[in-house]
Image: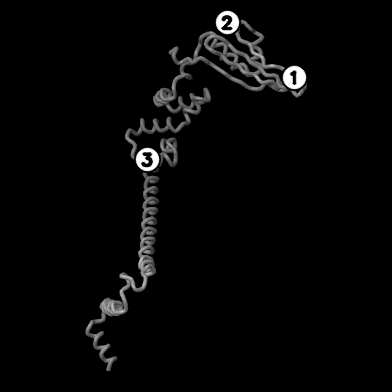
């Protein structure tokens, strides 16, 4: 467990209470206590004042009532008690565990205990409200989690998924399916329209690129033949027989 202890066991900094404007820093390491201060003053005689520093061993700090009173005035009695406990060798190992291990421990607690633990420190409050914790809670209670539930959790959050009943989850998943189907149909319709427009523009662009007299130019005789064929095909498409078309043309010639 001693490997969890870093070089710095605790550190805090801040401005002194009003009307004091000085800035202070208090830190506890494995071997000593460090107290630093910076004088903040608008007066000209205080501008050249250098920062102060006091270093004491743990035993000397426990016997120094003056320094302890300063720590209590600037940072409060709770910081004073915590620093005294550190100097006496009472370390909070649970607070120093890595996040993945703490999240694994939290999944074995009841929700009431998790809520109480979240009020003990800033770190535990952050962990108890994190998406990683609620994702582990959902997976541990539900076992296998489908891809649709994971997609819903990305939208609503794992905590909302945890407190939502199975029936409500099925309804929300069904709504997501309908929305995705509508979006897919809309995209397909847009794709078909765009494709038709592109294809309709292709002949015009190609015809504009043909130069008269070139090999691509069909010439007047070929154009007449193509027009006659188009007329026959168009007439057949309208339900007009080829014989009727020829008789009409013959009668008109007469």
Nearer-the-camera pick, 190 or 232: 232
Secondary element type, mark 1: helix
Mark-to-mark CA distance, 2 and 1: 33 Å
Q: Position of residue 225 (x, y in %)?
A: 27, 79
Mark 2 lies on residue: 59
Q: Position of residue 205 (x, y in %)?
A: 38, 66
Is residue 220 placed above or below 49 in the rendered structure? Answer: below
Tell me the crowding category of disc 1: few under 14, some 14 to 19, or many 20 or more residues within 10 angstroms, Cα based: few
In the image, what residue occupies the spot 65% across and 8% down? Answer: 65
Left or right side of 5 for 146 = left
Q: Nearer the viewer, mark 3 or mark 1?
A: 1
Farthest front residue?
A: 213
Nearer-the-camera pick, 148 or 142: 148
Mark-to-mark CA distance, 3 and 1: 63 Å
Mark 1 lies on residue: 46
Residue 109 showing in the rendered view: no
Farthest bottom residue?
A: 254
Ranked by sequence position, the earlier of labels 3 and 2 is 2
Quadrant that contains the N terminus: top left
Q: Position of residue 143 (x, y in %)?
A: 33, 33
Report how many numbered discs are placed on residues in the image. 3
In the image, what residue occupies the spot 39% across and 53% down? Answer: 183
Tell me the crowding category of disc 2: few under 14, some 14 to 19, or many 20 or more residues within 10 angstroms, Cα based: some
Residue 113 showing in the rendered view: yes
Mark 3 lies on residue: 149
Query: Disc 3 vs disc 2: Cβ atoms closer than 8 Å?
Result: no
Q: Position of residue 208 (x, y in %)?
A: 39, 69
Applied colour scheme:
one colour
Ranked by sequence position, the earlier of labels 2 and 1 is 1
Tell me the crowding category of disc 3: few under 14, some 14 to 19, or many 20 or more residues within 10 angstroms, Cα based: some
């Amino acid at each position: 467990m001693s490997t969890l202890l870093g070089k710095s066991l605790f550190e805090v900094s801040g401005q002194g209470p009003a009307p004091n404007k000085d800035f202070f820093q208090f830190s506890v390491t494995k071997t000593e206590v460090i107290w630093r201060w910076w004088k903040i003053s608008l007066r000209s005689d205080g501008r050249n004042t250098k920062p102060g520093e006091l270093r004491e061993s743990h035993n000397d700090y426990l016997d120094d009532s003056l320094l302890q009173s300063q720590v209590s005035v600037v940072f409060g009695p709770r910081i004073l008690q915590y620093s005294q406990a550190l100097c006496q060798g009472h370390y909070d190992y649970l607070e120093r565990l890595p996040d993945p291990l703490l999240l694994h421990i939290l999944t074995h607690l009841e929700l009431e205990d998790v809520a109480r633990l979240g009020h003990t420190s800033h770190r535990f409050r952050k962990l108890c409200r994190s998406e990683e914790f609620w994702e582990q809670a959902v997976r541990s209670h539900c076992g296998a989690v489908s891809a649709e539930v994971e997609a819903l959790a990305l939208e609503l959050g794992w905590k909302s998924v945890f407190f939502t009943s199975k029936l409500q989850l099925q309804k929300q998943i069904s709504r997501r399916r309908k929305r995705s189907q509508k979006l897919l149909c809309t995209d397909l319709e847009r794709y078909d329209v765009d494709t038709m427009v592109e294809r309709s523009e292709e002949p015009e662009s190609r015809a504009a690129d043909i130069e008269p007299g070139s090999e691509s130019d069909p010439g007047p005789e070929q154009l007449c033949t193509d027009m006659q064929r188009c007329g026959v095909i168009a007439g057949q498409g309208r339900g007009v027989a080829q014989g009727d078309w020829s008789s009409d043309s013959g009668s008109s010639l007469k």
